[in-house]
Image (cartoon, rainbow, N blue to C red):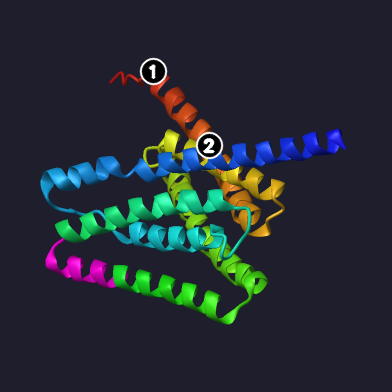
Amino acid sequence: MNSFMSSDSFHGICCYAAGVAGNLFAFVLFVSPIPTFKRILRNRSTEQFSGLPYVYSLLNCLICMWYGLPCVSYGVILVATVNSIGAVFQLVYVILFIIYSDTTRKLKMSGLLITVLCVFSLIAYVSLGLFDHQRRQIFVGYLSVASLISMFASPLFIINLVIRTRSVEFMPFYLSLATFLMSISFFAYGMLLHDFFIYIPNGIGTVLGVLQLLLYAYYSRKSREESRQPLLVSHG
């Protein structure tokens, strides 16, 4: 009896530790755009920056936050905490982007923000009104998986860019590392809880994170080797 209780307690501690680690690493990702927005505030212009990633991240955070709440899923509150914090950050970023955009982009971004809030409200209304708790979890779970996988697909463009340019200039090491650590933490969290809707998308994110780190190691080493090569001297 005691060994069962200690085993169960150890499992609970591991779940909590993995979830908290995922929250911490995700926080690093949430604050990473701050230098961009410092520049926007300083110049009072969004320049050529795109606001679309922040709008889409807001929708993703809202859907995943909804999945983590007790009215949808039991025992995954750390998914709700991380995504509620993320939603606040993304909302602030979007609002700042709207404030400092020109008129055309201001209208476009405002329309996208309203659309995101309407889509999330519809998801919440439908899931509460049409489904019992079990079906609600499945419905919102599949939406969160689709949203997370599409979010994790964005590194594919960066990976393609790194391979094409043979440079890691546009793939900061610490962001790649934080993405990998967040993904593997939530992958472990999902596996420990046997939650398909958490471990599948974060498993994909972990694989992509490993790929980014391997590419970073390969191309950064290659660029260092090339920089050490002696210059060819032409004797005419």
Say whether residue 102 is left or right of residue 155.
Answer: left
Q: Is 69 left, or right, of 101 in this rendering?
A: right
Which quarter of the rendered picture does the C terminus lie within? Answer: top left
Residue type pointed to by label 1: Pro
In the rendered image, the residue lying farthest to the front is: 1
C-alpha gap between disc 2 and disc 1: 28 Å
Picture coordinates of residue 54 (x, y %)? 34, 57
In the picture, the quarter occupied by the N terminus is: top right
Task: Select label 2 or label 1 by which is in front.
Answer: 2
Tag 1 residue: 230
Whether residue 138 is in magenta: the answer is: no
Query: Foreground: 43 or 31?
Result: 31
* Dominant secondary structure (helix, strand or loop) of the stretch shown in magenta: helix
Say which element carries label 2: helix
Task: Name which residue lies at 73% across and 39% down.
Answer: 11
Q: Residue at x 36, y 70 (%)?
A: 117
Of callouts 2 and 1, the N-terminal one: 2
The boundaries of the magenta stretch are: 101-112
**Residue 49 visible in the snapshot:** yes
The residue tagged 2 is 213
Name the element at disc 1: loop
Can you name the residue that lies furthest to the bottom here?
A: 130
Residue 155 seen in this snapshot: no
At label 2, counting other C-alpha atoms closer than 10 Å, the crowd grade (few under 14, some 14-19, many 20 or more) is: some
How many numbered discs sit on the rendered protein?
A: 2
Q: Position of residue 159 (x, y in %)?
A: 48, 47
Is residue 108 inside the magenta stretch?
yes
Q: Is residue 84 above or below residue 189?
A: below
